Image: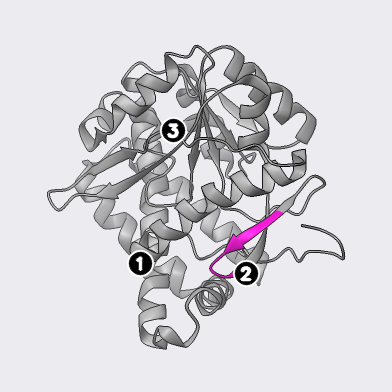
Amino acid sequence: MRHAFQKIARVSFSFLLILLRIIPYPAFRGLARIVFGVMYALSPKMRRIARESLDIAFGSAMSPEEKSRIAKSAYFNLSLGLADVARAASCPGFADRRFHFEGRENLDVALKKGKGAVLCIAHFGPFAAMVYKFIEAGYPVGIVMRPLRNQYFKDRIMEEGTRQGLNPVYSVPVRGCVLESLRALEAGRVLFMPVDQNYGSAGRIFVDFFGRKVGTAPGPVAYALKTGAPVLFAYALPLKTGGFRILIEPEIPLMKKATDRETLVYNMAVVTSRVEALVRQYPDQWSWMHRRWKAVPKDGEI
């Protein structure tokens, strides 16, 4: 049953992406809401994961009804954000119209150091689509991401995005990801790195997130320390008039601690605290359908 649903979901999403090239964008978003609504209703596992995540984060401080509302809104925001990726990849100029910068000078100052920049992002709002705004603004970018499963997205959308200058850095194999990330920074790129997903592989560290330890990849800080690249945090917030504003925060100063591992833990905790503050303020914009708290520290692991 689960595999059948996944196949239907992949086919439905591929169909939507094809329609994106044919019908006007407002009509597409209306149709997408209907399709995503059906997919959400038919996915009890996804709803359960979202509810479990919200229970961990907010406990009894939030009512069951509010948690259900947030879970559904978050799903729609994430799904429509992925649809915007397809639109941005296939329609040059779309991202420039839909997104507006705030704090762009922070990135420009960081890039003047000539070391590239590590731009930490979360699975928040249209996190992937906003990258195209940076491309259209002339920034050389790279983005660390997992290999895609949707074949249409992989073959068509990513092909067009790469042609525009997306430069994906795939997270597996890990060694390849490390080498490509370092090359991107050495080339002066803005390297987008998601920092809010469970990481259970070797080299993981644990930091606090909503009062509990979460397995975290130390890459952003590790790469910055190795290359001298500055670390920043960016996200997109919806505007009442439509579209989004991209907020780029000032450079996060890295602090050295007694050991390399303590340095990684301390600074990734600072980055993660930025994500938590953002999610607390806008919970319906974050992806609760992910088991962020899945990894558990072993004895002696920090």
- The residue pinned by badge 1 equals 73
State whether residue 164 appears in this view.
no
The disc, 3 or 1, on the residue closer to the chain's N-terminal end is 1
Mark-to-mark CA distance, 2 and 3: 26 Å
The residue segment tinted magenta is 206-211
Which amino acid lies under the numbered mark 1 shown in the image of this protein? Answer: Ser
Q: Single out the mark in the foreground, 3 or 1.
A: 3
Residue 195 at x, y percent in the picture? 57, 46
Residue depicted at 41% across the width and 69% down the height? 38
Image quarter of residue 212: bottom right
- Which of the image's four quarters has the C terminus? bottom right
Q: Secondary structure of the magenta portion, mostly? A: strand
Q: Is residue 265 left or right of residue 296?
A: left
User: Could you say which disc has been placed on residue 212 in the image?
Assistant: 2
User: Of residues 272 and 130, which is closer to you in this image?
Assistant: 272
The CA span between labels 2 and 1 is: 24 Å
Closer-to-camera residue (220/261) = 261
Residue sitting at the far front: 258
- Residue at 34% of width from left, 32% of height from top? 88
Q: Which dot, 2 or 1, sits closer to the camera?
A: 2
- Amino acid type assigned to the residue bearing label 3 in the image: Glu
210 inside magenta stretch = yes
Instruction: Say what secondary structure mark 1 lies in.
Output: helix
Query: Which residue is denoted by mark 3 in the rendering?
Result: 251
- N-term mark: 2 or 3: 2
Query: Is residue 252 rendered magenta in the image?
Result: no
Of badges 2 and 3, nearer the viewer stands 3
In three-dimensional space, the C-alpha distance between marks 3 and 1, rounded to whole angstroms, equals 31 Å
Q: Which mark is residue 202?
A: none
Above or below for 25 versus 1: above
